[in-house]
Image (cartoon, rainbow, N blue to C red):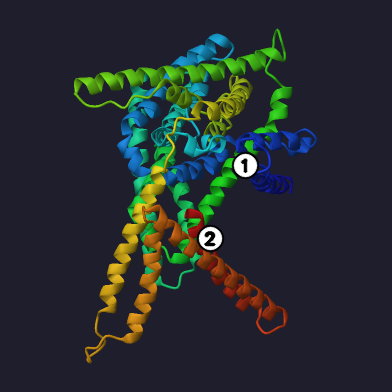
């Protein structure tokens, strides 16, 4: 009962934080941490002991899958050079540089545990960056690099974290053996992700052949996909993290959604959006819930001389160390890009100083770091406590909060003015796609309208009338996307009036259905069926309005 109440309270405050963030000018992750801390101080009984393995299984697969599915695939391929440079090269550079710096700053932390903390601090959180600064203020190229890096360094950082933890548990490390194991974990993890996606597609195909299967059953297959990929890879000694990422990256382009019914597609996208919000929010509230205990039990290694100032100074110094390492790597990478472009006689696209600073500050740590560090084993194989576990959890929590605070203060100021005024390239691309799709639809409808009916060889008047009505709607859509400002303004005004009338009609429909239900003319099932249709129509209209 205690655990059930704990879960309910966390979920309630995840929802509350989504509303509060609109009222206070604070990044969502920082607000959720504050909510958790506020809950923990007066209510000591809310603390729940976390099982590391279960925690990793519950949070990591869906978070990584969701991030991978939402990543822009075309940009990932086009910017693969800088993305791989940051997602792999910077991860190893951070592990070595930060690991030694931490061991020097806090000698009581064993070097291998310092490397583990460095590895788990390597993953960045592009979602947290989006909550701190408007995407329109950050250059599109930089934002795509940050998103691609956040996706891939989740995998590389957590894989290296697992290796470092294994070395701490066994007390031995072989570079050759670790390299072979790493390559196997990567290759087998990718294959496991592909295999899980293939199995999910076959199951959905089978459900389609059976026919009459509820949409909820199809949605369940999609929800289980990241967990199947993760567990399948872990059971063969591969990287479940990479398996979940691979399954997420390939899901969008694999065509698996064609095996889902319309209702199942809508429910799947909606459910995954909700799950991503819930898991991210729950992680930060969990961090906040543990924050008073973490602060109240500051490891003596960090506060031997100055119990308050020394732990804070250590966290700030380590956060600045991460930012400095990141800036140094981006700067060296910029130089290497220029030299390489000059040798190949190509045009280079280097980052300016402000973009380098923005890219360095934007490397905030978030949900994946938190999930990873809380998965540290409680004990060693001989039953003794895991070395410096409380210290590294305290430091990881401190760095997450400090990086979020620094980014929320500095990033909006650094990023301001980096994007040239004008139409958003994404909006222009979407407009072009809408026009192309509408023209294709018009061509198909007109060819069908011109077809003859039956043996009489005549064109149906009803068919022509229906085609004219549908084509008129598509032509209005094209006019609304016209590059000429006057034509676009006129079409948008007409569209606005039509939308206003349609929404008024929908409200009248809803009121009439509700009145018929109250008078007993229709029952609950009929009312819910009609409300579902009305709501879907309203969602479609308002979605179209939001995109204009």
Alpha-carbon neighbours of circle 1 within 10 Å: few (<14), some, or many (≥20)?
A: many
Q: Relative to residue 249, is residue 526 depicted above or below? A: below
Q: Nearer the viewer, residue 136 or 367?
A: 136
Mark 1 falls on what kind of element? Answer: helix
- The answer to whether residue 218 is visible is no
Q: What residue is at 35 percent from the left and 49 percent from the top?
A: 195
The residue that mark 1 highlights is 282
Q: Which residue is mark 2?
A: 542
Q: Residues within 10 Å of mark 2 (few under 14, many from 20)?
A: few
Task: Give residue 197's mark.
Answer: none
The picture places residue 541, in percent across and down from the top left corner, at 51, 63
Residue at figure coordinates x 55%, y 49% from the top left:
275
User: Which of the two residues, 344 or 211, is positioned nearer the viewer here?
Assistant: 344
Can residue 259 be seen at all in this image of the molecule? Answer: yes
Q: Nearer the viewer, mark 2 or mark 1?
A: 2
Q: Looking at the picture, how far across and down is residue 9, in whole percent?
A: 71, 46
Q: Position of residue 504 (x, y in %)?
A: 60, 70
Answer with the quarter of the image where residue 331 lies.
Answer: top left
For the point 66% across and 74% down, the residue is 511
Name the residue nearer the viewer: 27 or 36. Answer: 27
Q: CA distance from mark 2 to mark 1?
A: 29 Å
**Position in image of residue 42 (x %, y %):** 80, 35
Q: Residue at x 51, y 55 (%)?
A: 546
């Amino acid at each position: 009962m205690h655990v059930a109440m704990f879960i309910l309270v966390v979920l309630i405050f995840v929802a509350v934080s989504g509303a509060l963030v609109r009222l206070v000018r604070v990044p969502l992750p920082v607000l959720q941490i504050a909510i958790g801390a506020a809950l923990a101080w007066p209510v000591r009984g809310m603390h729940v002991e976390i099982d590391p393995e279960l925690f990793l299984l519950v949070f990591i697969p869906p978070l990584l899958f969701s991030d991978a599915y939402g990543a822009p695939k075309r940009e990932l391929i086009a910017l693969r050079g800088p993305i791989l440079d940051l997602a792999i090269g910077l991860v190893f550079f951070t592990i070595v540089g930060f690991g030694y710096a931490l061991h020097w700053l806090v000698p009581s932390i064993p070097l291998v545990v310092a490397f583990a903390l460095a590895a788990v601090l390597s993953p960045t959180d592009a979602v947290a960056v989006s909550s701190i600064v408007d995407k329109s203020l950050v250059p599109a190229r930089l934002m795509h690099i940050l998103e691609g890096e956040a996706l891939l360094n989740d995998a590389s950082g957590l894989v290296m974290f697992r290796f470092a933890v294994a070395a701490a548990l066994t007390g031995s490390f072989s570079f050759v053996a670790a390299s072979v194991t790493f390559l196997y974990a990567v290759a087998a993890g990718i294959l496991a992700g592909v295999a899980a996606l293939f199995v999910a597609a076959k199951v959905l195909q089978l459900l389609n052949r059976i026919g009459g299967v509820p949409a909820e059953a199809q949605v369940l297959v999609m929800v289980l996909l990241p967990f199947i990929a993760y567990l399948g890879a872990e059971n063969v000694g591969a990287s479940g993290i990479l398996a979940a990422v691979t399954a997420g990256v390939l899901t969008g382009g694999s065509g698996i959604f064609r095996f889902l019914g319309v209702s199942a597609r809508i429910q799947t996208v909606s459910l995954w959006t909700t799950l991503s919000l819930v898991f991210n929010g729950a992680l930060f509230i969990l961090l906040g819930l543990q924050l008073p205990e973490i602060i109240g039990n500051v490891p003596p290694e960090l506060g031997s001389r100055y119990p308050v100032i020394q732990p804070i100074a250590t966290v700030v110094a380590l956060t600045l160390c991460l930012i400095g390492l990141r800036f140094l790597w981006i700067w060296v990478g910029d130089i290497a890009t220029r030299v390489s472009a000059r040798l190949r006689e190509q045009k280079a696209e280097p980052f300016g100083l402000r973009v380098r600073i923005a890219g360095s500050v934007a490397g905030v740590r978030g949900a994946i770091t938190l999930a990873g560090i809380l998965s540290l084993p409680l004990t060693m194989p001989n039953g003794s406590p895991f070395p410096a576990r409380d210290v590294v959890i305290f430091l990881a929590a401190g760095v997450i909060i400090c990086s979020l605070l620094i980014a929320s203060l500095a990033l909006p100021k650094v990023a301001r003015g980096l994007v040239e005024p004008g139409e958003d390239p994404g909006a222009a691309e979407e407009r072009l796609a809408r026009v192309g799709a509408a023209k294709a639809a018009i061509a198909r409808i007109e060819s069908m309208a011109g077809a003859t009916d039956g043996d009489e060889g005549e064109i149906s008047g009803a068919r022509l009338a229906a085609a004219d009505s549908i084509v008129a709607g598509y032509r209005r859509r094209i006019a609304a996307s016209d590059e000429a400002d006057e034509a676009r303004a006129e079409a948008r005004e007409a569209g606005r009036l039509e939308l206003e009338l349609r929404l008024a009609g929908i409200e009248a429909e809803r009121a009439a259905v509700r009145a018929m239900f109250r008078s007993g003319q229709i029952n609950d099932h009929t009312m819910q069926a009609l409300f579902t249709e009305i709501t879907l129509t309203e969602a479609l209209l308002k979605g179209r309005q939001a995109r204009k």
